[in-house]
Image (spheres, rainbow, N blue to C red):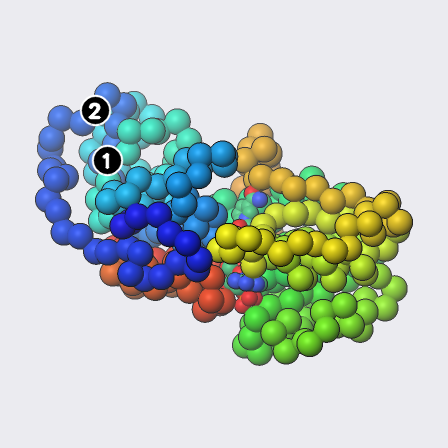
Amino acid sequence: FKGYIDGIPKETDMELNFSNNIQFNQQLPSQALLVKNLYLSCDPYMRGRMRDFHGSYIPPFLPSKALEGFGVSKVIQSDNPNFKAGHYISGFTGWEEYSIITKTDQLRKIEPDDHIPLSFHLGLLGMPGFTAYAGFYEVCSPKSGEYVFVSAASGAVGQLVGQLAKLHGCYVVGSAGSKEKVELLKSKLGFDEAFNYKEELDLDAALKRYFPEGIDIYFDNVGGDMLDAALLNMKIHGRIAVCGMISQQSISDPKGIHNLSSLIYKRIRMQGFLQSDYLNLYPKFLEQVSSFYKQGKIVYFEDMNEGLESAPAAFVGLFLGKNVGKQVIRVAHE
Ligand code: NDP
């Protein structure tokens, strides 16, 4: 990571460096692990760490250092009794081929499972999947038969929200930014309807077309104009789970929202949340969502880029809508 940025991230904000400062069989710091990184996760929140802002829930990246993010790694050497060489783990690691991890308290040991790809621990069974699970069940208070709208619906979080809502007996519509994504939502992910928001001149009219009776639950991944239009189309006592605002994330002067008075007229509950507030539910989530997947009740799409050198483009692609499904980088083969 070269230094703090404005606007949408560019590939040139990052550079590939070669270094040999990780040695095998070196004395590790107390409790630390030396790991080989297999998969790295590209997540929109990482954009927030590219500015020099200390008021967030996570500190900014350090310029001239490797980026860090969620990864799936194999333990090579360990000074920690909870992890042994050969174990697979998920948690924070560096955007590097090998990393020394000193903060080990949040790492999870992965029990290898022939039916679940390891990389799914960054998506379906990782932070984005858990965001969908906690956001939908805990924040949206869903009831069978309700009308649910999901934005960025084909992404890492959105695709699971829509499928959980369908399993819950809801009617689900998703928005996404390309014809290919809309097709995926309808033909493979089980959404009742989907539309390409980039082709809609009037988002309010689009939502009225798909929800003539109004929306009970809006799972908001984008903020901005879509949130404004959704506010106009909520039903009385509707719920809005404010998960992310990717449309506003790279704008230094975000747009105002005009329709907040709908919150009063329609007694809407609009709640921001962080998945990390619900971590006590993680074991239940892993069990339930793995079982849905193994029973074929849900599917999950990944967008896999090959090689660490492809990481900058993959990350930037999140903000251009290039990823179809969860964006992952394969750094090394298992
Ligand atoms: P995705 O896999 O959905 O990737 C990002 C997608 O956002 C892109 O593919 C693109 O899809 C869409 N997008 C990009 N720019 C814009 C824009 N200007 N306007 C509208 N859509 C845009 O990402 P995730 O599923 O990982 O994350 C989804 C949201 O959830 C993000 O806002 C993220 O910050 C948030 N999040 C929140 C968490 C929490 O704890 N609250 C935890 C994890 C994620 P398209 O082609 O459809 O436009």
For this view, does 263 lie left or right of residue 174?
A: right
Query: Is 6 located above or below residue 306 in the figure?
Result: above
Which residue lies at the image location 36% right of the left edge and 61% below the top edge?
Answer: 10
Report x, y in % for residue 71.
Answer: 36, 46
Q: Which amino acid, by three-letter code, is at mark 1?
A: Ile
Q: Is residue 276 visible?
A: yes
Which class describes the residues within 10 Å of circle 1: few (<14), some (14-19), or many (20+)? many
Report x, y in % for residue 305.
Answer: 34, 64
For this view, does 66 lie left or right of residue 127?
A: left
Which residue lies at the image location 78% right of the left edge and 43% below the top edge?
Answer: 269
Report x, y in % for residue 155.
Answer: 54, 60
Q: Where is mark 2, residue-wise?
A: 29
Which residue lies at the image location 29% right of the left edge and 61% below the top edge?
Answer: 12
Q: Which amino acid, by three-letter code, is at mark 2?
A: Pro
Earlier in the chain: of badge 2 and badge 1, it is 2
| In the foreground, 264 or 213 | 264
For this view, does 21 lie left or right of residue 131?
A: left
> Hey, which residue is sitting farthest front in the picture?
253
> SS for tag 1?
strand
Which residue lies at the image location 21% right of the left edge and 24% below the top edge?
Answer: 29
Name the image quarter holding residue 221.
bottom right
Q: Is residue 110 visible?
A: no
Picture quarter with ligand 1 = bottom right
Name the image quarter holding residue 329.
bottom left
> SS for tag 2?
loop
| In the foreground, 97 or 189 | 97
Name the mark on residue 52: none
Q: Where is mark 1, residue-wise?
A: 100
Is disc 1's CB within 8 Å of ligand 1? Answer: no
Is disc 2's CB within 8 Å of ligand 1? Answer: no
Query: Is 197 located above or below residue 26 in the figure?
Result: below
